[in-house]
Image: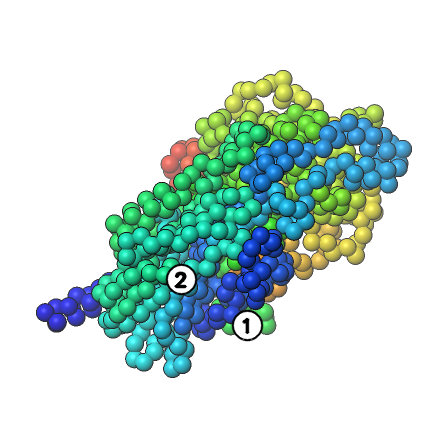
């Protein structure tokens, strides 16, 4: 009997090793030293007493510079779009930071009620005519003053500036600790790895002749995190799981059965209910859940099943008098269901289901540069990055970072929840940088640049659902401030439909009326890639139309016949202007989208004529005295200015009204801007410049920006840093590499438009081009070998390589091969 038990245990270990092996082969990165416990519960700030009683602080320490640098640069992020977790991998006690994406403070359910939240828009539309007259009178100071005093709101952006804090912030769901009874003394072979192609984190080490392994993943189909502790010998699992709550909440830890805990709590600020449910499943040994902890003794293996939820429910038609407009879920019930269903499946089935779901998305795109996959040298990621920063070539790192961006998008943005925020879904404090919110003057948009082009269009659905939450409040904001039809939003949004500006009078960042139209362009972009007519008709069109109406109404019809966006700004940079280039570029984009959409659907011919008139008369791009594309209506650009925002190049990227193919002079002027701004900046800014250089078809300069992003804008765990950690740079980097390999924004598929000399050979599979084409490319010696084009919609196709072009009809579901010979492109 004892032999049979040993045999069965050995067989189970062999089966269990499959997932671990997957995590340590293929695309992965790893650390060879364990993290410490120094940063646990950083919100306590070394003084737990300050979080007790009625006078709790609203924030914890420096929210811009992360107080736990180890978490920020060494943790492994896992997630499923709703639940996020960071794995630290300490040996004596595993520390896991936990997030649920809808756990937000603020909103209409704070103590002062719904109207305190909603009635914040100033009635400023009447001031617009005075600002425009000030521009006519060349009284720029008056125009600036009127804008500063009338286009803010009473809502502060800082958590400690008002009580209750109504804008709110994304906040931590607490931390989990799993004490092991082990020490690092005598430990060997430590490895903490994250598999990019299986979305599995693994911690492994040896101690006293025993090999220990931990596995972690967050399943989208099951909506649970599974954590497995196992060892090479039976009976070695002696574990204690405990939970540290978010300190701006009050709740109760309840034992259920003998192997489960439920933390049921409410945030102090807005009474939002949230639940954390934790269950232990042990093979052998004993389990109990007394004193608010789960204790396991003498088990062969332990699986922890953990899930979280809040009472939040999105509302696309909120009643502005209803404090509970966004309450509609019972998290006790949902977490109960998820844990029970996961337990019934068992660990192996859970992992298989998770892997199949994740791989069905991730495996759509494969990238191999200079055969780096076959020639990779295994080393810790911090060492790999250190070598790269010293100038060592590492093509594996370059393709790993590219795919890591796709991993992060899948992990932080799946249908059924909010879109990826400033940190995706990962946060380790009560408050955080810029409230860890939805910044709409580039950051939220940048998160979704790689979605369609890297074959992850499903991951963009949360963005569209989020935009829908902004429409009704955004209509009120548009009318109050600008007297327009349609809708818009301002610089920062939350999960409660906030569309107003904030209280600051600094209009360089707080005046952002074209954030809404920029968001709406994503809906047309999705249609352009997918050619999903039902989506365009039923989900996108009314939102695009509302944005186009807002943009057309906003424009000032000057006496000289030119239409300008007055007042406007270049986000986070410079003065209030009578027609900033950024604003005009966004207006062009949304008007073009609306015109095309109305033609396709045969709708709103009368409205279309208004949009076409606005597009015809809008102020043109201007080239300044330095040969630069001007940022403002006046030629005041400073060639020594290296500001991180490059807003006036919106038409080059992400828009499509500036191109070396169609507007070579404007493209040349855009190059001057990029040369003046320089090749360094914050992480996300380098990501944007990378895309812009790619759009200029300068592969070597784009590659330089990609290298700078990795060297100077990337933390050791591959997260982008502003500083601090800000995830948009990861997504911008992935989008930029795609733009180097293929572009489709100008009405044709452009193969290898910005291939750098360093990437002499390689191949990429599964990229998506507008028109619902899927493209694979092979190149050698820096030249195209062949491309495959799969037609998903049966539409005509045009392919360009260098100066060669070929046009051909396609049949839906058929694949075509394109090669280059004798200066011509050949299609088979």
Outermost residue on the front side: it is: 53
Reading the image, the residue beneath label 2 is 242
Q: Position of residue 339 (x, y in %)?
A: 32, 49
Q: Secondary structure at mark 1?
A: helix
Name which quarter of the figure residue 723 lies in.
bottom right
Which residue is depicted at the point 58% across and 40% down? 111
The quadrant in which the N terminus is found is bottom left
Q: Position of residue 76 (x, y in %)?
A: 46, 62
User: Mark 2 or mark 1: which is in front?
Assistant: 2
Q: Position of residue 692 (x, y in %)?
A: 64, 49
Which residue is depicted at the point 83% across and 40% down? 145
Compared with residue 732, is residue 811 higher up or lower down, i.e. above or below?
A: above
Reading the image, the residue beneath label 1 is 387
In the picture provided, is 132 more to the left or to the right than 45? right
Mark 1: give few (<14), some (14-19) or many (20+) Cα within 10 Å: some
Question: Of residues 39 and 9, which is closer to you in this image?
Answer: 39
Distance between the Cα atoms at labels 2 and 1?
A: 39 Å
In the picture provided, is 579 more to the left or to the right than 293? right
Question: Of residues 84 and 615, which is closer to you in this image?
Answer: 84
Outermost residue on the top side: it is: 606
Q: Position of residue 198 (x, y in %)?
A: 37, 56
Compared with residue 565, is residue 338 higher up or lower down, i.e. above or below?
A: below
Q: Secondary structure at mark 2?
A: strand
The quadrant in which the C terminus is found is top left
Which residue is depicted at the point 62% across and 33% down? 115
Question: Of residues 546 and 58, which is closer to you in this image?
Answer: 58
First in residue order: circle 2 vs circle 1 = 2
């Amino acid at each position: 009997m004892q032999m049979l038990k040993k045999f069965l245990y050995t067989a189970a270990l062999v089966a269990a090793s499959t997932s671990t092996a997957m995590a340590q082969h293929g695309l992965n990165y790893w650390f060879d030293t364990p993290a410490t416990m120094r940063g646990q519960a950083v919100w306590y700030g070394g003084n737990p007493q300050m979080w007790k009683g009625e006078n709790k602080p609203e924030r914890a320490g420096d929210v811009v510079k992360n107080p736990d640098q180890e978490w920020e640069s060494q943790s492994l992020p896992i997630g499923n779009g709703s639940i996020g977790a960071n794995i630290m991998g300490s040996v004596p006690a595993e520390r896991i930071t936990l997030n649920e994406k809808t756990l937000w403070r603020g909103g209409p359910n704070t103590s002062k009620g719904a109207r305190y939240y909603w009635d914040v828009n100033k009635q400023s539309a009447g001031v617009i005519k005075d600002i425009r007259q000030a521009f006519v009178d060349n009284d720029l100071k008056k125009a600036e003053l009127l804008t500063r005093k009338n286009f803010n709101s009473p809502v502060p952006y800082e958590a400690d500036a008002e009580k209750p804090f109504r804008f709110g912030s994304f906040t931590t769901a607490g931390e989990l600790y799993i004490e092991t009874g082990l020490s690092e003394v005598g430990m060997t072979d430590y490895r903490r790895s994250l598999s990019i192609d299986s979305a599995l984190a693994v911690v492994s080490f040896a101690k006293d002749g025993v090999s220990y392994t931990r596995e972690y993943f967050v399943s989208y189909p099951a909506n649970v995190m599974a954590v497995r502790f196992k060892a090479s010998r039976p009976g070695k699992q002696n574990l204690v799981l405990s939970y540290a709550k978010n300190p701006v909440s009050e709740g109760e830890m309840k034992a259920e059965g003998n192997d489960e805990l439920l933390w049921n709590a409410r945030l102090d600020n807005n009474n939002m209910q949230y639940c954390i449910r934790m269950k232990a499943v042990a093979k052998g040994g004993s389990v109990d859940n007394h004193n608010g902890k789960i204790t396991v003794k003498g088990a062969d293996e332990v699986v922890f099943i953990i899930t979280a939820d809040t009472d939040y429910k999105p509302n696309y038609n909120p009643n502005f008098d209803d404090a509970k407009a966004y309450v509609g879920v019972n998290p006790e019930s949902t977490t109960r269901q998820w844990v029970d269903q996961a337990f019934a499946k068992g660990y192996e089935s859970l992992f298989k289901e998770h892997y199949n779901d994740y791989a069905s998305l991730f495996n759509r795109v494969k990238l191999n540069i200079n055969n780096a996959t076959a020639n990779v040298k295994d080393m810790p990621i911090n060492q790999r990055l250190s070598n790269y920063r010293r100038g060592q070539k590492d093509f594996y790192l370059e393709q790993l970072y590219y795919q890591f961006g796709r991993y992060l998008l899948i992990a932080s943005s799946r249908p059924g929840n909010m879109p990826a925020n400033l940190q995706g879904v990962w946060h380790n404090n009560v408050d955080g940088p810029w409230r860890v919110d939805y910044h709409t003057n580039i950051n939220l948009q940048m998160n979704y640049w790689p979605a369609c082009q890297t074959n992850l269009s499903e991951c963009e659905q949360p963005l569209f659902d989020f935009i829908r939450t902004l429409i009704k409040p955004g209509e009120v904001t548009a009318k109050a401030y600008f007297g327009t039809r349609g809708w818009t939003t301002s610089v920062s949004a939350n999960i409660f439909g906030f569309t107003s500006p904030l209280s600051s009078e600094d209009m360089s960042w707080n005046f952002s009326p074209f954030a809404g139209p920029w968001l709406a362009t994503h809906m047309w972009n999705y249609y352009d890639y997918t050619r999903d007519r039902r989506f365009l008709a039923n989900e996108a069109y009314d939102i695009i139309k509302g944005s186009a109406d807002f943009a057309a109404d906003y424009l000032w019809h000057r006496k000289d016949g030119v239409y300008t966006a007055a007042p406007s700004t270049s986000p986070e940079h410079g003065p209030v202007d009578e027609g900033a280039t950024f604003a005009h570029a966004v207006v062009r984009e949304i008007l073009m989208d609306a015109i095309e959409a109305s033609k396709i659907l045969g709708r709103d011919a009368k409205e279309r004529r208004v949009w076409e008139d606005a597009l015809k008369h809008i102020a043109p791009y201007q080239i300044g005295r330095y040969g630069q594309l001007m940022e403002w209506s006046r030629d005041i650009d400073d060639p020594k200015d290296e500001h991180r925002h490059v807003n006036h190049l919106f038409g080059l990227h992400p828009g499509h009204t500036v191109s070396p193919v169609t507007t070579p002079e404007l493209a040349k002027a855009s190059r001057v801007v990029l040369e003046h701004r320089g090749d360094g900046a914050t992480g996300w800014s380098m990501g944007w410049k990378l895309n812009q250089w790619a759009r200029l078809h300068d592969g070597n300069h784009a590659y330089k920006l990609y290298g700078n992003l990795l060297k100077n804008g990337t933390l050791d765990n591959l997260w982008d840093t502003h500083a601090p950690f800000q995830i948009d740079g990861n997504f911008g980097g992935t989008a930029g590499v795609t733009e180097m390999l293929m572009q489709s924004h100008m009405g044709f598929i452009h193969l290898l438009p910005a291939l750098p000399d360093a990437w002499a050979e390689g191949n990429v599979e599964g990229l998506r081009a507008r028109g619902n084409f899927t493209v694979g490319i092979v190149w050698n010696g820096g030249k195209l070998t062949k491309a495959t084009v799969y037609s998903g919609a049966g539409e005509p196709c045009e392919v360009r390589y260098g100066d060669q072009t070929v046009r051909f009809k396609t049949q839906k579901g058929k694949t075509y091969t394109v090669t280059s010979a004798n200066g011509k492109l050949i299609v088979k």
